[in-house]
Amino acid sequence: MGNTKKLSLVLAGLLLSGSLAACDDGRGGAEAAAKQLASAVAGLDLRPVAFDGRDSAVANDQLNQVFRALAPAKPSVEAGELTLDGDTARIPLNYSWKISTGEWKYTVSADLRKSGDKWLTVWSPGLLVPNLAEGEILSKATQSSPRADILGAGNQKLVTLRPVVKVGIDKPQLAGADAADSATKLAKLVGVDPAAYVQQVAASGAEAFVPAITLRNTSDRAVTDAEIEAIPGGRAIPDELPLAPTRNFARAVLGTVGEASAEQIEKSNGTLTAGDVIGTGGLQQQYDAQLRGTDGTVVRVQRADLTREEIQAAPTDPRRTVFEVQGVAGTPLQTTLDTKLQQLAEDTLADVKPASAIVAIRPSTGAVLAAASGPGSNGYNTAMLGQYAPGSTFKVVDSLAMMRNGFTPDSTVECTPTLTVDGRKFKNAEGYPKDSLGSVTLRDAFAHSCNTAFIAARDKVTQAQLESAATSLGVAVEAPKLGAEAFLGSVPGEAEGTEHAAAMIGQGRVLMSPLSAAVMAGSVAKGSPVSPVLVEETAPATSSASPAPTPEGSAPSSTVTAEAPAKTAQTPVTKAEAAALADMMRAVVTSGHAGFLAEVPGEPVGAKTGTAEFGNANPPKTHAWIIAVHGDLAVAVFVEDGGLGATTSGPLLKKFLTAAG
């Protein structure tokens, strides 16, 4: 009985096995081969796949050649529903690529053939890209969208597309000439390093155009097309680039635009590719994403051996487009800079050798009209980022703090030749008038900038009150609407002894930038704290480029660590307080040592000079400052290592205000 049952089970198993074998039409093996193919294509490695009529290694090489232009992207590939016909099968392969901001989807068919007990893939380039033929590959090109303009006051175009020529060696046009010789001649002609350029040309492919320099394409261009083309392979290609009116116009504020470097491309995580134009430094870098917009991308099918010359010579493009992502133009950046005043400020500083700056703002709105850094700043944004002891311009802050402690412009103070605090001797500036010594009004002490009179008031004004008075005038206060990087000033809330005494004359740990000095003057003119504005209606500031290095020798000379700015003014300056400060600033012109400003036409000028010692030299070097208000205009002029504010910065201010009208 037991043996009979076992035999029955064996027979049943054999019958079931035979039934399954009879039902197996090969679909399972074909589907497994199809899934393996889809996985291999997605991984860009066909070596595990068995092909009919093609070696796996050869097929793999061809796949990588076809898709090389899309690297480092890889496709997602899924096998669809298989159609079986005896020993042959067809399977749809559904591709999906992430290309730029778009998704390229397509479906191709792959054929399978059964050989013995194995399913082989029938090789065809068409299983990679629809209708792809032997000898064809994909190419990808980036189509840059127009970079948006940077606008100034009144929608003046500060940075816009201007004509340039890209000068370089076009290697296909060498016509047998020695590439190194041509590269050397061209480098000398346009003023670039010959050795470096020769190396660059040698390292480039046979079809490459190797740029040496980009020049503004103006009628008075120093290097002509004829001179360039006289060199074998030399070529000048007309183009356009976003440029300011001149090479130096607001350069430190606006930044520059150029092709992305290899380092920037590497750090962009795929955002940038060769040939992309990006901003470097200043607003161009800070708002690069907004200005650059989104580049378009086009994927084409072309012969693998197609040359650039053949493409250019063909009456119609010999390539066929298979996928395209339309670019989106950048959005203009609106600033408050005034073209006339910015250029005037730069012209005023043109011959100043040390680092220097002129900042002009409109007190009523806070609009920054000019932020110029002179040639001695070597590309550094001295106007907005400089950190310097403000010297006696800070007596505007002192005076406000003193008035809040019972003083008036007519209060009597003692102006002595010297004053010693904890063993440190303080004195007035060289050449201080003797007839202004003794018992004088606070107004007179301010007008002639008596250091000792203000230091003597240190027992009546705490350091915390100085800090509060500074923020009342917009100094060391955050500027949420500025829209650009800036140093807004730093006034410590705690200081004792000689450090507190030094703070009373704008030294010690007190720091300001020319921008914050202009804000201080503007707050007096407005009668309330000014919050500066440079970029209007700002979009989120982002950057794909790495920060530009700070030029050597251009950073501020101060070694003091700045305090973080306050969120808001503790006690905003009142109109009555501002009127008293304006009266004292006017006295600097009418009876003090800025009398030369009385000749400026238009509304009366109020001013305050400043001279701040720095460094360890004997006698010490000094920064030269002057601030002024003239109607609805507040200006700060600064010269590093400039001597006295009245004699160095003063004439620059007079020139600027007179021409500004």
Image (cartoon, helix red, strand yellow):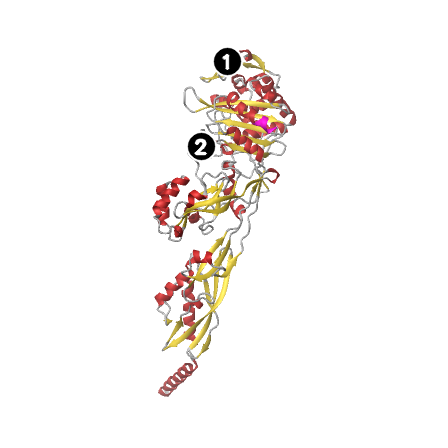
- In this view, the residue in front, 33 or 548, is 548
> Dot 1, crowdedness within 10 Å: few (<14), some or many (≥20)?
some
- Residue at the right extreme, as displayed: 576
Image quarter in which the C terminus is found:
top right
The percent coordinates of residue 474 (x first, y second) are 57, 31
- The residue under label 1 is 417
> Which residue shows up at 60% across the image and 37% down it?
153
> Which residue shows up at 35% across the image and 42% down it?
195
Check disc 2 and give the amino acid type.
Ser
Let me know if residue 72 appears in the view: no
- In this view, the residue in front, 10 or 345, is 345
Q: Regarding mark 1 in the picture, which secondary structure is present there? A: loop
**Vertical comparison of 61 with 396: above or below:** below
**Vertical comparison of 95 with 414: above or below:** below
The percent coordinates of residue 541 (x first, y second) are 53, 44
- 2 or 1: tag closer to the N-terminus: 1
Image quarter in which the N terminus is found:
bottom left
> Dot 2, crowdedness within 10 Å: few (<14), some or many (≥20)?
some
- The residue under label 2 is 554
Q: Regarding mark 2 in the picture, which secondary structure is present there? A: loop
- In this view, the residue in front, 341 or 99, is 341
Check disc 1 and give the amino acid type.
Pro
Question: Cα distance, mark 2 to mark 1?
Answer: 35 Å
The percent coordinates of residue 132 (x first, y second) are 45, 66
Mark in the foreground, 2 or 1: 2
- In this view, the residue in front, 63 or 212, is 212
| Residue 144 magenta-highlighted | no
**What span is colored magenta in the figure?**
656-661
Let me know if residue 434 appears in the view: yes
**Vertical comparison of 33 with 388: above or below:** below
